[in-house]
Amino acid sequence: MADFCTIFRHPLITLFLTLSLSISPTTQQQLAASDLNALRQITYSLTDVKTGRFFATWNFSSPETPCYSFSGVTCAVVNGDLRVVSLYLGTGLSDSPGLAGAIPADAMYELTELTQLILYPGIVTGFIPDQIGQLKNLRVISLTNNRLTGTIPESIFELQNLHTLDLSHNKLTGVIPPTLVSASPELRVFVLAYNELAGDIPEFSNESQLIHVDLSNNMLAGKFPETLPATLRYLSLSSNGLWGPVNGVPSSYLVYLDLSMNKFSGPIPDSLFRPTLSSMYLQRNNFSGELTPPSTSSPESYGPGSTVDLSHNFLSGEIPDFLSGVETLFLNNNRFAGKVPEGYVRNVFGGMTKTLYLQHNYLTAFPMEKSGVLPEGVALCLSYNCMVPPAVGLTACPARAGGPFSRPFRQCSVFDSGNSMG
Ligand SMILES: *[C@@H]1O[C@H](CO)[C@@H](O)[C@H](O)[C@H]1NC(C)=O
Ligand SMILES: *[C@@H]1O[C@H](CO)[C@@H](O)[C@H](O)[C@H]1NC(C)=O
Ligand SMILES: *[C@@H]1O[C@H](CO)[C@@H](O)[C@H](O)[C@H]1NC(C)=O
């Protein structure tokens, strides 16, 4: 027994055992010819950039099947044939330069059992082949951070099993296919951010089960969609040219909403002020009117981790009580007037509120004790209002808030009489 253990631990023996276990070419099933051909097509069309090593393992002369030796290729036995079911093109490592070339249309046509197609960041150019819509089993398409051009093939939305579509950070143009009305019933994640897409936001089917939609940083124009999937948890339409009032935001599951840097106008719907919607970015729009508390008062309040940014709009009236529990709150550069409610002062000095930006409004008082000391890490800015701000209200102003500590008296009196000031 002791002898056996000694022998077994011998490095050479261990090496031998490992090798004989991993090499068994005769028992390997061969990859279907069409898929093998498709992989070949890929190497004719896509290449490593300079120092990249992704295709180093793609050796078509090796007796091993690509399923076990090519990096990024995963296979499964489908109806008795060994087929490629997922392709991860590129290493995905942050120090990897990625791939260059184009996505080969012919290869896409043949990989009919593909469920996942991932292209990692690189400098791949050209169009997304229309043939992609033929790959009926695709569940995940992620072609991000490359230089893809052209329009989004409508055929993608005919894929009945598609769960995730991420084409973000490319140079795609044209409109988002409006066929989303009848789109992939399984689609949950829909990310087209950072492209050059124009036109309207597509209409979503009322039966859509979308959870995550990011269309930010495009050139979309037009109005806020009339209906959005009730299942949404994450919606970003930031940095587009969208305008008009915002209505019909589904409320039940939404936790993240970013409509910043558009031209949305009218009042902010009170239904958006729910603590469960804990990250809300509406800054740099054209919203106006007073903030009204949600009609259905909820027992919870905003808490740790919550962020609400309403800065750079035309909001007026008094600052409402119901936002006082928000951890990071930006109300600066609006037309708020009157006294800051005491709840805000308490939360700032208690350290529950970490950031409170109220600069560039028409506020008249911040009711605090004379000798308030801000807790470590709390940022408060009160400059350029209709009051002499307390010293603690100037220490954390962002450099760009600049300017004098108080708004000129002339503007404050004009504002009181109802005239609009820019
Ligand atoms: C590819 O595999 C063949 C056969 O096993 C081998 O002779 C050759 O050296 C390999 N090429 C590379 C670049 O590894
Ligand atoms: C979706 O809209 C259609 C047509 O208006 C309607 O018949 C259907 O009941 C709606 N489905 C849901 C889940 O609301
Ligand atoms: C933004 O609001 C201002 C004043 O409320 C208005 O004059 C302007 O036309 C609005 N711009 C857009 C694009 O809605």
Image (cartoon, helix red, strand yellow):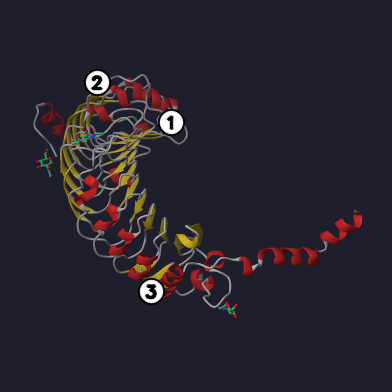
Q: Does the image show residue 370?
A: no
Residue 97 pos. (x, y %)? 45, 68
Q: Does the image show residue 15?
A: yes
- Picture disc at residue 45: 3
Picture quadrant where residue 417 is located: top left
Residue 127 pos. (x, y %)? 29, 66
Classify mark 3: helix, strand or loop: helix
CB atoms at circles 1 and 3 under 8 Å apart?
Answer: no
Residue 216 pos. (x, y %)? 28, 49
Which residue, given by chain and number where applicable, does mark 2 sit on? 295
Residue 98 pos. (x, y %)? 44, 67
Which residue is nearer to you in this view: 209 or 304? 209
Q: From mark 2 to mark 1, how far is it between C-alphas?
A: 23 Å
**Mark 3 vs 2, N-terminal side:** 3
Q: Residue furthest right?
A: 2
User: Looking at the image, which residue is at 13% across and 30% down?
Assistant: 415
Q: Check the image and report above or below for 408 versus 163.
A: above
- Picture disc at residue 304: 1
Give the residue type at disc 2: Ser
**CB at mark 3 closer than 8 A to ligand 1?**
no
**Mark 1 vs 3, N-terminal side:** 3
Q: Nearer the viewer, mark 3 or mark 2?
A: 3
Q: From mark 1 to mark 3, how far is it between C-alphas?
A: 50 Å
Q: From mark 3 to mark 2, how far is it between C-alphas?
A: 58 Å
Which residue is nearer to you in this view: 320 or 88? 88
**Mark 2 vs 1, N-terminal side:** 2
Q: Quadrant of ligand 2?
A: top left
Classify mark 2: helix, strand or loop: loop
